[in-house]
Image (cartoon, rainbow, N blue to C red):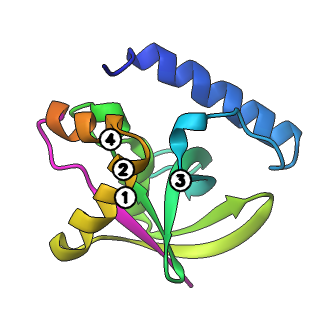
Amino acid sequence: MIPPRWFFRVIWAIDNTVSRASGGRLSVPNGSRGTLRTLFLHTIGRTTGRPRRNGLYSVEDGANLVVVASNAGEDVDPAWWCNLQAQPDADVEIRSAMRPVRARLATPAEAGPLYERFAAAIPTYAEYRERASRPIPVVILEPR
């Protein structure tokens, strides 16, 4: 069962606050995330031009980092993915270390196996795919 949207927003806000206060050393514990790690994606708002910071689960794929624009199974893309489509250059923060990246949509051949890594770590990712009426983008963050 997928928790209600407000639940995710509260957890994300707490995690963001804890991470900022600790300089990236601490995060809200989540034993269900398995092999996924947390990163903070820094983008520029496509309409406001303001900096944005979003905590996301990721997996490594060689030199690349991979994130999923699931938006908890909602029928709209998350704002961070819309921002990346407008400006694919971004920064990733992992434990207070910044990395410049360029985002791209995974090809269909890449997306399937990568998405399965998320679903294996957190089974609700499989539910997100069933719930959403849109294809859920798999986003590859390549070093730049």
Front tag of 4 and 2: 2
Q: CA distance from mark 3 to mark 2?
A: 10 Å
Q: Position of residue 47 (x, y in %)?
A: 44, 47
State the residue at coordinates (53%, 55%). Answer: 35
Count every numbered label the image shows and give the total.
Answer: 4
What secondary structure is found at the residue carrying circle 2? Answer: helix
State the residue at coordinates (49%, 24%). Answer: 8
Identify which residue, 49 or 37, lies in the foreground.
37
Q: Is residue 23 left or right of residue 32?
A: right
Reading the image, the residue beneath label 4 is 125
Q: Position of residue 44 (x, y in %)?
A: 55, 55
Mark 4 residue crowding within 10 angstroms, few (<14) / some (14–19) / many (20+): many
Residue 65 within the segment the image draws in magenta: no
Which amino acid type corresponds to the residue marked 1 in the rendered image? Answer: Arg
What secondary structure is found at the residue carrying circle 1? Answer: helix
Q: CA distance from mark 2 to mark 1?
A: 5 Å
Q: Which mark is residue 36?
A: 3
Q: Is residue 30 left or right of residue 102?
A: right
Q: Position of residue 121 (x, y in %)?
A: 43, 48
Say which quadrant the C terminus sits in. bottom right
State the residue at coordinates (57%, 45%). Answer: 54
Please report the bounds of the magenta region as a residue range. 132-144
